[in-house]
Image (cartoon, rainbow, N blue to C red):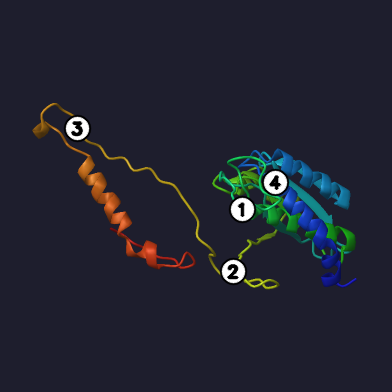
Amino acid sequence: MPIKNRFAELLPEITEWRQDFHRNPELLFDTHRTAGIVADKLAAFGCDEVVTGIGRTGVVGVIKGKTDTTGNVIGLRADMDALPILEETGVDYASTTPGKMHACGHDGHTAMLLGAAKYLSETRNFDGTVAVIFQPAEEGGGGGREMVEDGMMERFNIKEVYGMHNWPKLPIGQFAIRPGPFFAATDQFELIVEGRGGHAPNQMRRLIRPLSRRISLWRCNPLSRATSTLTATLWSP
């Protein structure tokens, strides 16, 4: 059966999964409902193995192809967690949990990988093994690292992992790929400024002035306002 036709048949079901995940967003590692649904569906699809609790709430499903001449195991990965955002979209499948929303599309990622898992389990028209990886805590919790440190790569002998991210600006039916880093990432740092208190001004080392100057320099950084998030830059004040 042609891939295009089969996925067209699966589309209403995949859409239903996505909208259910969207109504019920979960944050960071607290993806128990989502992970439970994923594990149940993978088992119903006929995956050869379904393992839960990897990296706390991660799920991995193993699908073996019709042949295995190389022993290769390829990972396909999706993230499951939402964001601490109040949804105001007004859609009929909007979040039912105030202050939580699938604003980054991980509901879609999870549903898409479930669709791929169902198709691969049905056809198995490939050589080797596929491990479908459902990761918690992508939004700042380091869920991918937790799964790796939990021995996922060695346990399933995974050689390569492929993932994707939705991009609403791309026309429907198209996808994009490029070598090297893709998209921006966020990070956190701590700035400690030491001063000296006192009763008389001439005995004090005031902190407001150096802190305000540092903040002004960051806000005036021209790169932050004129550079695409897809472009690597370096700025030193």
User: In which image quadrant can residue 96 be found?
Assistant: top right
Q: Which residue is mark 1?
A: 89
Q: Earlier in the sequence, mark 2 or mark 3?
A: 2
Q: Which residue is mark 3?
A: 196
Residue at image location 77% in from the left, 52% down from the top: 17
Kind of residue at badge 2: Lys
Q: Which residue is mark 2?
A: 169
Q: Is residue 151 above or below residue 11?
A: above
Labels 4 & 3 near each other (Cβ < 8 A): no
User: In which image quadrant can residue 160 be found?
Assistant: bottom right
Please provide percent x and percent y for residue 169.
59, 69
Task: Give the foreground label among 4 and 1.
Answer: 1
Task: Give the foreground label among 2 and 3.
Answer: 2
Q: Which residue is mark 4?
A: 23
Q: Earlier in the sequence, mark 4 or mark 3?
A: 4
Between the residue at mark 4 and the residue at mark 1, the CA separation in whole angstroms equals 12 Å
**Quadrant into which the N terminus falls:** bottom right
Task: Give the foreground label among 2 and 4.
Answer: 4
Between the residue at mark 2 and the residue at mark 4, the CA separation in whole angstroms equals 24 Å
Secondary structure, mark 3, is loop
Q: Is residue 169 above or below residue 63?
A: below
Q: Earlier in the sequence, mark 2 or mark 4?
A: 4
Kind of residue at badge 4: Arg
Q: Could you tell whether 69 is left or right of 76 in the image?
A: right
